[in-house]
Amino acid sequence: MVSSSLGWICLELELELELELEQHHGQKRGIYGVCPAPAEPSDPTPANQTFRPGEELQKLKWIREKLRKINKPPVKTIQSSDGDLIDCVLSHQQPAFDHPNLQGHKPLDPPERPRGHNPTGSVPESFQLWSIGGESCPEGTIPIRRTTANDFLRASSVQKFGRKARRPAMRAVRRVRHVRRDTSSSGHEHAVGYVMGDQYYGAKASLNVWAPHVVNPNEFSLSQMWVISGSFGDDLNTIEAGWQVSPELYGDNYPRFFTYWTTDAYQATGCYNLLCSGFVQTNNKIAIGAAISPTSTYNGGQFDISLLVWKDPNHGNWWLEFGSGLLVGYWPAFLFSHLRNHASMVQFGGETVNTRPNGFHTSTQMGSGHFAGEGFGKASYFRNLQVVDWDNNLIPLSNLRVLADHPNCYDIQGGINSVWGNYFYYGGPGRNMRCP
């Protein structure tokens, strides 16, 4: 809710930005979106809420500066049916090139794909809501989901917008040879397959997309790949990609394609998508952070996506490919410490946040919201799991292990066959009779 005083401050800042944009770029489109949505007239003001105009003004000015950095002037803007605005930004003006190591650079040419990689899949040309109507960004630009002040104001802390919460206690999971993961007592719960004990230079998997119900705005449900290196202390390096439902980050319950990276265990480095200088996008067909459509249906059609992350053997950058051959972009090698060399662990699977609303386990779903034992068409899955070896070859996993933090809430069952190779089903409903 926006008070009338805050509203006037906000509108003044937004008008200033409108005039600046019109003056410098010949556009008048509310590009920065500083003002949050106005309150309904009938909304009561909480009795214990004190309006401090000085603090609110500083907060909005801070948000304005962040929006200036994140939202680049577009050559075209596309209105998506889900409410998103997709800006087509010249590729050399994307946020990555604000990084001191990249200023004045342009996106790199595609690297050599791993040997044994045969791009397959049925991902349609338009698999995101913004492009289903035939809209597209011109060559030489990339589509970027526009960030608004509302996005910042939904975050638990505006300073931490676009970043995963730091996991305060990187604990060891003692049940399986002290496997360490990015889980902790902070309410994050996992059902994952993983490999470790070797040097990994990439990973590939196909996973089906669902729209799990997330009951609390501060919770999320995601399915992703993690490429991991470091000691699981403050030096943890990760590269991450998959799909997620996150009302806090996006303001809705659509499953969205996302990326993430960190080089210091989610403390000060890294971010989701293109919300900081880091990932360099090279593709004009995919908007990172935009909603995926279609999704899988229970006992019905299944829609899955393929993801490949691998280290370019010539330049050391980590590249991301989506679907049947669409190169999304790359994480420059200089972003990382341990991942400049190789990964020491690869993880696939689901993650939720359990805030224990009303003292009970959350009913936020993982995957399809059904347990692994229900199988194809009902449970969520990862299939055709592979890793990239030192010589840039895609090879099958030789030692896949599976682990669920709370199997009565979300579980996992692995297998192997001639069609799906290494695979597993995973997920669950969260709270139920065996998971109070």
Image: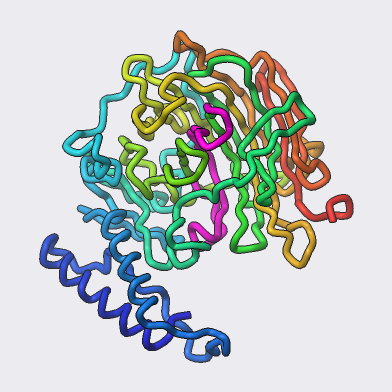
26 versus 312 height, above or below: below
Image position of 391 (left or right of 88): right
Is 241 a magenta residue?
yes
> Is 177 colored magenta in this rendering?
no
State the image quarter where residue 327 is shown. Answer: top left
Rendered location of residue 56, percent (x, y): 38, 76
Q: In the rendered image, which quarter is residue 22 located in? A: bottom left
Total marks drawn? 0
Q: Indicate the quadrant where residue 411 lies.
A: top right
Q: Is residue 321 visible?
A: yes
Front-most of 271 and 33?
A: 271
Q: In the image, is 15 to the left or to the right of 164?
A: left
In the rendered structure, the answer to whether residue 189 lies left or right of residue 124 reads: right
Q: Residue 158 placed where, x, y %?
A: 44, 62
The residue positioned 52% from the left and 91% from the top of the image is: 42
Residue 398 in the image, given as x and y percentages of width and height: 66, 13
Q: What colour scheme has been applied to the protein in the rendered image?
A: rainbow
The reply to whether residue 377 is in sight is no
Q: Is residue 217 above or below residue 94?
A: below
Judge left or right: residue 32 versus residue 300: left
Please provide the residue range marked out in magenta.
229-257
Q: Residue furthest right?
A: 433
Q: Is residue 407 above or below residue 26?
A: above
